[in-house]
């Protein structure tokens, strides 16, 4: 499966960092035009639902149960350290039919690390996630959306395709509620987009994963109202299909 067109790793890093800035929506057309797959744009009738930072024994089981009630599958970008700490739960997420992807070994930006260190950590994460879930991950989302040059090179060697997002609930922000998560998502929710939420509080404020989970029924209802199918990254269109994982 070919990677998204990438002009240079410097541009990729700038595109990733832009997701963290208040003015990100202003340059959304630039991102979509230059890096549509990296940005998470797929089939216009589909929305990819993704979760970062787990698997978390406190919050992930509740989320998996809720998704089962709605008959929806999602893509879980797991941290290698979290999968290693809860291997049984990681297997349960995969067994429930969800797609498994990689979010790194630990939740930190590796801008100062040597390429060999970046590669070693990402390989460790990929191998751990694959061993615990039974799925060989095909996708990688860097912590904070910061895709460094070293991470680009490491992901390519490991046959991991980088993926960012188009809509984020920002549930980690102080004072965030289910209502604020929905309001933030609805500002950028569009057919073909990729939604980012979190299934763990361990990298954010307490209660953030709960706010995301509580917002999910209304989010799924709104997608259905718009005629949008919600599912995994693998179901996001021909360009997102891989040889591994469900879909």
Image (tube, helix red, strand yellow):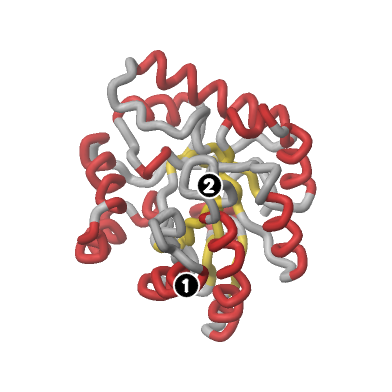
Q: Residue at x 20, y 61 (%)?
A: 23
* Residue ID for mark 2: 52
Image location (x, y in percent) of residue 86: 71, 33
Total numbered labels placed on residues in the image: 2
**x, y percentage for residue 38?**
38, 49
- Residue lying at 41% horizontally and 59% vertically, measured from the top left: 170
Q: Residues within 10 Å of mark 2 (few under 14, many from 20)?
A: many
Camera-side residue of 117 and 9 = 117
Q: Secondary structure at mark 1?
A: helix
Residue 41 visible to the viewer: no
In the image, 212 versus 175, the foreground residue is: 175
In the rendered view, tell whether residue 9 sits above or below residue 196.
Answer: above
Residue 111, image quadrant: top left
The x, y position of residue 149, in whole percent, is 29, 29
Above or below residue 181? Residue 16 is above
Residue 182, numbered circle:
1
Q: Nearer the viewer, residue 89 or 73?
A: 89
Left or right: 11 in relation to 131: left
Q: N-terminal of the two: label 1 or label 2?
A: 2
| Mark linked to residue 25 | none
Q: What SS does tag 2 mark?
A: strand
9 horizontally vs 161: left or right: left
The structure residue drawn at horizontal position 73% and vertical position 51%, both measured from the top left corner, is 61
The picture places residue 27, in percent across and down from the top left corner, at: 21, 61
Structural distance between the alpha carbons of marks 1 and 2? 17 Å
């Amino acid at each position: 499966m070919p990677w998204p067109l990438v002009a240079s790793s410097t541009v990729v890093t700038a595109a990733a960092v832009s997701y963290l800035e208040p003015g990100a929506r202003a340059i959304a057309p630039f991102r979509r035009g230059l890096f549509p797959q990296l940005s998470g744009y797929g089939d216009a009738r589909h929305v990819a639902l993704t979760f970062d930072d787990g698997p978390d024994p406190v919050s992930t089981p509740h989320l998996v149960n809720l998704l089962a009630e709605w008959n929806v599958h999602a893509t879980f970008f797991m941290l290698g350290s979290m999968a290693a700490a809860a291997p049984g739960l990681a297997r349960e997420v995969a067994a429930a039919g969800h797609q498994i992807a990689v979010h790194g070994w630990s939740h930190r930006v590796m801008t100062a690390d040597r390429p060999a260190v970046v590669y070693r950590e990402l390989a460790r994460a990929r191998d751990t996630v694959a061993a615990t879930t039974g799925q060989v991950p095909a996708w990688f989302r860097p912590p904070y959306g910061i895709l460094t040059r070293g991470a680009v090179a490491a992901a390519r060697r490991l046959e991991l395709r980088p993926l960012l997002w188009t809509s984020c609930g920002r549930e980690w922000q102080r004072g965030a509620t289910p209502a604020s998560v929905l309001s933030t998502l609805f500002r950028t929710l569009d057919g073909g987009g990729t939604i980012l939420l979190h299934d763990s509080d361990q990298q954010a404020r307490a209660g953030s994963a709960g706010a995301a989970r509580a917002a999910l029924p209304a989010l799924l209802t709104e997608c259905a109202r718009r005629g949008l199918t919600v599912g995994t990254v693998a179901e996001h269109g021909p360009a997102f299909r891989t040889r591994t994982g469900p879909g």
